[in-house]
Image (cartoon, rainbow, N blue to C red):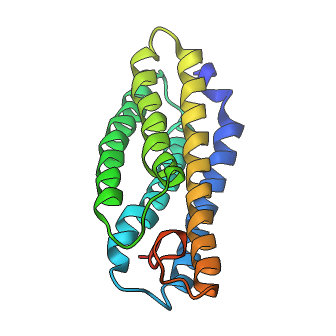
Amino acid sequence: MSDLADWGSFYGIIGSAAGALIGLQFVVLTLINERPPLRAAEAGAAFATPTIVHFGAALLLSALLRVPWQTLAPAAALWGLIGVSGIVYATIVARRVRRQRVYEPELEDWLFHAALPVVAFATLALSSLEAGAHPREALFAVGAAALLLLFIGIHNAWDSVAYHVFGQRRGGDSPGREGSGKGDT
């Protein structure tokens, strides 16, 4: 399918970046895990695991759209399934962020851990419904969603690292940004 073939380089870049960043995130989490605070698993489920899920979704989308499909319909059905699953997962994450008591989330945390992931996954779900009638536009929407998921993951990974490096350096066991646990596993 020529519409999809034109996107090969884009998804090659997105997929490679997501794969490399997943590996880097595991290295960082391993290093951070040397000094886990109390209730680290609670914060990890709310902050660290979603970062890997967002990188993984970008990688999965990139692989899915590099498959030599004969028509766009099977790819659209699969990216729609990723979108719906992602919305459910983002809802679970928002609940975890709200319930955890290790770190007091700020507006930026709600934006990058709840709102933007829902936007990305909803874009996937809705674009799958329009793929038959508007394939070119649907593929642009999927590209935007994959890129958004990649940037969400980059932001959240950096936020976790900065939190641990700078918060820990100040001896941070106080609530808020210098608290204990954001992004731990």
Q: Residue at x 59, y 16 (%)?
A: 136
The quarter holding residue 160 reads bottom right
* In the depicted structure, whether residue 164 falls above or below residue 150: below
**Between residues 179 and 94, which one lies in front from this camera angle?**
179
The quarter holding residue 163 reads bottom right
Q: Residue at x 50, y 50 (%)?
A: 107
**Picture coordinates of residue 31, whole percent (x, y):** 56, 85
* In the depicted structure, whether residue 59 falls above or below residue 137: below
**Between residues 28 and 76, which one lies in front from this camera angle?**
28
Q: Quadrant of the C terminus?
A: bottom left
**Between residues 12 and 161, which one lies in front from this camera angle?**
161
> How many tags in the picture?
0
Q: Residue at x 68, y 27 (%)?
A: 6
**Picture coordinates of residue 2, whole percent (x, y):** 63, 20
Q: Residue at x 58, y 41 (%)?
A: 148
- Horizontally, residue 35 falls left or right of residue 42, namely right
Q: Which residue is at the far top?
A: 133
**Picture coordinates of residue 104, whole percent (x, y):** 42, 64
Q: Which residue is at the far front?
A: 174
* In the depicted structure, whether residue 73 falls above or below residue 78: above
Q: Quadrant of the N terminus?
A: top right
The quarter holding residue 172 reads bottom right
* In the depicted structure, whether residue 114 falls above or below residue 77: below
